[in-house]
Image (tube, grey):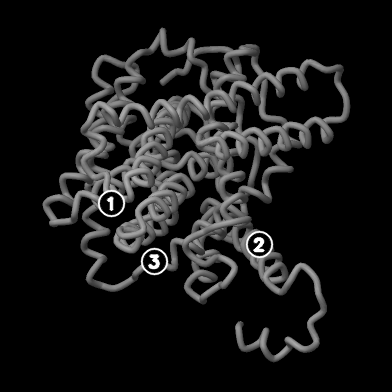
Amino acid sequence: MAELQSFWGEWIRPSAGFPAVQWALLLAAAALAGQLLQRLLAVPAILGYSVVGALAGLGGFAASAWPLTGLGRFLLELGLSVVLFEAGSRVSLRWFRHNPMVLVQSVLEAGLSFLAVRTLLTWLAVPDAVALPLALIGMAASPAVLSRVALDLRASGPVTERARTLTTLNTLYVLTIGGALAGLGTSAGGDAAAAPLRLAALQPVLVVLGLSFVAAALMALAMRLVLMLPAGSVEHTAIVLVALLAAFTTLGAHLGGSAPLAGLLGGLLLKQIDPRPWRWPATLQTLASPLVLLMFVLVAALAAQGDWSPALWASVAAVLAARLLAKALGLVLGSVGGALRPSQALWVAATMSPMSAVALVLTSQFASARPAQAADIAALALPAILVMELLGAMLAAHALRRAGECPPSAGLGGGTPAPTNNEKGGRDGA
């Protein structure tokens, strides 16, 4: 590609640049591949997005060089913020009073995932400055993959709703603690391996959470005012909501918070401010679809640039196996005394296995905060993210089908999922 650009250099006229052409063609190829795989093989469309992105990354796609910075990082975080806003808008805090075991399951799943990966890496003699960030990255689930798979399969039911809720809570923990730890590493010159063990480590956690909450509260209030206006053009309302989301999440990150975390909290707060059943407008979904597609392609392209040496594969496989077993154990233990059966808890664990944009954002934050350990963190994290974006999507689709929550024709074409229990104003059957 570099040789081609050099050859045509004297004829190229000033414009958006050849990378813009590459991105346009890459996104078109990804959308087409996703549609073909979905219709021909009855698999989630995200597999097509990820495969095309991975091939571009392995082929040295220059516009997706690691580590991600500038406009690319902004678009990745914006796409993730849109997904997390939608995920947060599905969660009603009032529902936890009727089913507190969900919180127990959430804490067990996240805590055991962190401990399992951290213990394994320590046993493999990985330094604490590398093991701690990797344990947090391994703890992360992927609301983006789950949302896309559920949409493609038109899945609805107790397993789907429990998975959505637990994945949202998991992301809340990971972004808060991960953002704080990355900030602590920056202020400590990258040598903060033992910092989370000190009481003073609570301060950066509160700072990240507090600043993100302020940006989210302002965003939720602004959106509520927009939604209270007399009904007008749906397209214009959707544009305003996405613009507000972009503005306030960027503001939260600029002040020292987290853009994706602000998006998640914004959706959560808007749900509490306006508890009446409301759905993510179809026009808004359509408007955000290119951002979500770009996010999946970008994650795969970046993750494919990791170290693929055979020597690392055993470590990556061990980390992923420990992570999945820990999530399954936490969810099964948390199902005791709850409405979710142990067999259903195992299907929920499979739907929480994917890793994607959340894990990549954390990896990028740690790479920037700890330059001395950046290569070691990325060496394990990037291959794990790519594998679990592909394999995790397949596991999630298989779990939702085996749980009996997909119509017979699911996977043969996209569609709008049935209204969830939260959207109907009822309690989650999980």
Dot 1 lies on which element?
helix
User: Residue 6: x and y, percent?
Assistant: 67, 88
Q: Residue at x 59, y 18 (%)?
A: 271
Pointers 1 and 3 in contact (C-beta within 8 Å): no
**Disc 3: CA contacts within 10 A as few (<14), some (14-19) or many (>=20):** many
**Disc 2: CA contacts within 10 A as few (<14), some (14-19) or many (>=20):** some
User: Residue 133: x and y, percent?
Assistant: 31, 47
Query: Which mark is first along the chain, 3 or 1?
Result: 3
| Picture quadrant of residue 376 | bottom left
Q: Is residue 331 visible?
A: no
Residue ID for mark 1: 320
Quadrant where the N terminus sits is: bottom right
Q: Residue at x 48, y 39 (%)?
A: 143
The kind of residue tagged 3 is Gly
**Disc 1: CA contacts within 10 A as few (<14), some (14-19) or many (>=20):** some
Q: CA distance from mark 1 to mark 3?
A: 16 Å
Q: Is residue 90 above or below residue 115?
A: above
Q: Is residue 109 above or below residue 72?
A: above
Q: Looking at the picture, tell me which residue is in the foreground, 172 or 313.
A: 172
The kind of residue tagged 1 is Leu
Q: Residue at x 26, y 65 (%)?
A: 313
User: Residue 404: x and y, percent?
Assistant: 44, 34
Query: Which mark is first along the chain, 2 or 1?
Result: 2
Q: Is residue 204 above or below residue 52?
A: above
Q: Residue furthest bottom?
A: 7
Quadrant where the C terminus sits is: top left
Residue ID for mark 3: 306
Residue ID for mark 2: 27
Q: CA distance from mark 1 to mark 2?
A: 29 Å
